[in-house]
Amino acid sequence: MNARWLDAELEDADRAPQRRGTSKKKKLLGRRRLDDLTAEDPDRIADDTIRRLIDLGHITEIVAELKSGKEATAYVARGPRGSVLVKLYRELEARSFKNDAVYREGQVILDERAARAMGARSRKGLEMLQAGWVSAEYAHLWTLWRAGLNVPEPLVGPFPFDYDATTPAVLMRLIGTEDHVAPRLSEARLTPEEAQSAWQQAVQGLADLLRLGYAHGDYSTYNLLWWENKVIMIDFPQLTTRQNPHFQELLRRDAHSLATSFRKHGVQVDGEATLREAQRLARGKGPEPRIVLP
Ligand SMILES: Nc1ncnc2c1ncn2[C@@H]1O[C@H](COP(=O)(O)OP(=O)(O)OP(=O)(O)O)[C@@H](O)[C@H]1O
Ligand SMILES: [Mg+2]
C-alpha cells in the first residue's frame, strides 16, 4: 500500500487549482435534478459553507485561497481571534474517502442505517463519511492540542455540537502569517542544522502520537509545517488508534514515509531505525498538557 503523500506526488496533486465540475454535462432541469445539480457543485458548496461560517461568527472574511488539493481546499481567513486556516473538504468522491476503510477498521458504528449507507457508498453515505472525517479531524486536533503536541489550535469546539455546524470545513489557527504562511517541510529550504533539528522534532512528533496510542496514517514532510524553527503536524482525519488491526502496519508505514521524505533534506536514516527511535522516545516523558479555558 502506498502512502497517500506518495500517491499525491505521483499524481502531481500540487498543480494549479482546477475548476471542478465545469466539464460535467448539465442535466435536464427537472425539480429533483436541479437539486442534485446544485448540491453537487463544489463551488456552490464552498460559497454556502463560507457564508455559514461568517453567519456563525467563526470568521469575518476570506483573505485568500491557499491551496487546492484532492480532497480539501485550504483558505486563509480572518476571525475574531486572529488568522484562521479553513480546510474545506469538497469532493465527496475524493479518493481517500474511497480508500478510507483501512483507517476505519476497528471503529464501531452504532447506527445500523448509517453503517449500511456508508457501506453502500450512496450519496447520503458519502456525506456521512465526509462528516465523519470532519468531526474526526476536529476531535483529534482537540485531543492532540490539549495533550500539548505541536499541532494547530482548533478554533471551533471542543464539543461536537459546535464543530458539527461547520461541516464540511475544519477551522484551526493559521501557522505563519497571512502574508507568509508556514511552508510544508517538503518545500522548505533548510540548512543542515535546521534539517537535523526538523528531523529530531518530526521523530519526536511520531513518538508523541504513539505515546497517546495513535498513528498518524499519512506522516511525512508533506503533512509537517515549518515555522520559526518548529515542526507542526497537520492533517489528522485518518489518525488511527491501537484498536485498528492495521495499527502496527500503519505506524511502520509512517516511519518509513517520514524517513523517505526527509532524504531530500540530506537526512539519511532507515525507516526501521526511525520506527525503533520513535518507539524508544515514546517510552519517555511527553509534553506538558495545555489548559483549555472555556
Ligand atoms: N494550520 C495551518 N496553517 C497553515 N497552513 C496550513 C494549516 N493547515 C493546513 N495548511 C496548508 O493546507 C494544506 C492542506 O492541508 P491538509 O494537509 O490538512 O489537507 P490535505 O487534505 O492533505 O490537502 P492536500 O491534498 O492539499 O495536502 C497543507 O498542505 C498546508 O500547506
Ligand atoms: Mg495533507
Image: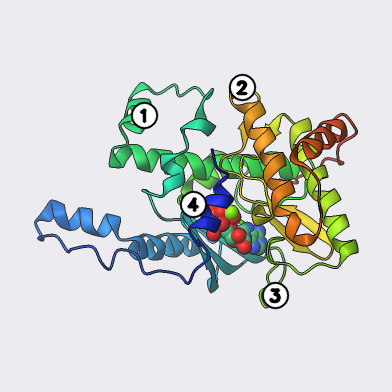
Instruction: Using the rendered view, name the quadrant where residue 198 is placed.
Output: bottom right
- Name the quarter showing ligand 2: bottom right
Amino acid type, mark 3: His
Q: Earlier in the sequence, mark 4 or mark 2?
A: 4
Q: Secondary structure at mark 4?
A: helix
Label 4 residue near ligand 1, CB within 8 Å: no
Disc 2: which residue:
243
Mark 4–mark 3 CB contact (< 8 Å): no
What mark, if any, has residue 192 been given in the picture? none
Mark nearest the camera among 4 and 2 is 2
Give the CA separation, mark 4 to mark 3. 26 Å
Q: Secondary structure at mark 2?
A: loop
Going by the numbered disc 4, the residue's amino acid type is Thr
Instruction: Give the number of the mark in front: 1 or 4.
Output: 1
Residue 199 in the figure: left or right of residue 235: right
Q: Residues within 10 Å of mark 3 (few under 14, many from 20)?
A: few
Number of numbered labels in the structure image: 4
User: Do the residues under discs 2 and 1 have CB atoms within 8 angstroms?
Assistant: no
Q: Taking 81 as reference, is 24 left or right?
A: left
Sequence-first tag of 2 and 3: 3
Q: Position of residue 144 (x, y in %)?
A: 72, 41
Question: Could you say where residue 111 lies in the image, as x and y percent from the top left?
Answer: 40, 23
Which of the labelled discs sits on residue 166, or is there none?
Answer: 4
Q: CA distance from mark 1 to mark 4?
A: 20 Å
Measured in 3D between alpha carbons, the distance from the residue under mark 2 to the one under mark 1, in whole angstroms, is 21 Å
